[in-house]
Image (cartoon, rainbow, N blue to C red):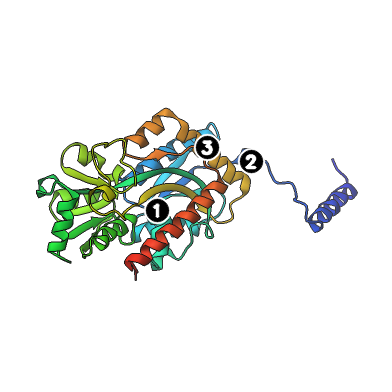
Amino acid sequence: MPTRRQLGRRGAAALALSAAGLPLARPALAAFPDRPITVVVPFAPGGANDLAGRLLADRIGPLLTPDGRALVENRPGAGSAIGADYVRRARPDGYTLLVGSASTLAVAPASGASAARYHPTRDFTPITVVGTSPLGVVVPSNSGITTLAQLVERLRAEPGRIGYASSGVGGVSHLAADLLANLAGTRAQHIPYRGGSQTAESLIKGETLYAVDQLGSVVGQVRDGALRLLAVTTRQRDPNFPDVPTVAEAALPEYELTTWTAMVGPKDMPEDVTAALSKAANAALSEPRVRERLESTGTTPMADSTPASTRAFLDREYDLYARVVERIGLRLD
């Protein structure tokens, strides 16, 4: 057992290291996680973002430690900003994480939402990019509209009277549908819902005429024939729907948007915890079952991002969406 004098010498040595600016020893990472991790999904259950969050939650716990567990908690609202702000205010210990989208980490803060007084990298710890996904312009199959040009013609004929659905005020589907009308030189009426599954339901019920939503949130209804996919929002056609044109091809040459999903935690998380979570997420995204599930919904998984590359990605995407927000004049609150 060390003597009091030996303990005193060790304490003095630690103080000397601290004064010299050298790092003190930290406890080993082996203790993380020693309780369940909460993965916050800022949308209602059923959409593409929810699926991504559940796939990651199912795998990152066991990939971190044999008995590790992660549980999904849905916290929708305010264009997904409520869930994001909840994570922003959580303890930065790695036990509360956010799986958010471009709506959450770019559109909502760029548009000035009062619930989104945050920045994607200054107020969070970037962990990994989960995947990217095109958006799709969809209408009810019984609407009589079979091409994007026909939808644009209808919007121009009834300015401000056609309703479009989104998965929340200030979300990427809100911005994307508004941008479509803007570039068509007209206006449309925004009708927000609480998630991708409700957006699709509103179209099928005839409450709205169109939506521009993440393909993963509407792909099931497209494949079963309830909705018609008119175009995708990326510059290239989607390999899952090679016969469907892009918006730029079909009617509006300037239009291009891509959404994405990313995992972040509260600001100032320990670097070793962040690195471990990033490694576990990438390992999960490399698994064939996880990749197949994501790809089936139109999401292209990424399994090679790092906390540093995720930070650069989020900064770049925030700037891009901020320019789109400025173009259409989207201001919330």
Location of mark 2 (residue): 29
State the residue at coordinates (36%, 37%): 294
* Amino acid at pointer 2: Leu
286 with respect to 31 (left or right): left
Q: Could you tell me which secondary element the residue under label 3 belongs to?
A: helix
Location of mark 3 (residue): 280
Q: Nearer the viewer, residue 87 or 289?
A: 289
* Amino acid at pointer 1: Ala
> Looking at the image, is mark 1 or mark 3 earlier in the sequence?
1
| Residue 313 picture location, percent across and down | 49, 50
Q: In which quarter of the image is the C terminus?
A: bottom left
Q: Which of 75 and 304 is in front in this view?
A: 304
| Residue 243 picture location, percent across and down | 23, 37
| Residue 29 picture location, percent across and down | 64, 41
Q: Quadrant of residue 21?
A: bottom right
Q: Could you tell me which secondary element the residue under label 1 belongs to?
A: helix
* 254 relative to 238, above or below: below
Can the viewer see residue 77? no
264 with respect to 293 (left or right): right
Q: Quadrant of the N terminus?
A: top right
Q: Could you tell me which secondary element the residue under label 2 belongs to?
A: helix
**Separation of residues labelled 1 and 2 (CA atoms):** 31 Å
Q: Nearer the viewer, residue 152 or 167?
A: 152
State the residue at coordinates (70%, 46%): 26
> Which is more foreground, mark 1 or mark 3?
1
Count neighbours of disc 2 (C-alpha within 10 A) and say few if under 14, some if 14 to 19, many if 20 or more. few
Count neighbours of disc 1 (C-alpha within 10 A) and say few if under 14, some if 14 to 19, many if 20 or more. many
Location of mark 1 (residue): 102
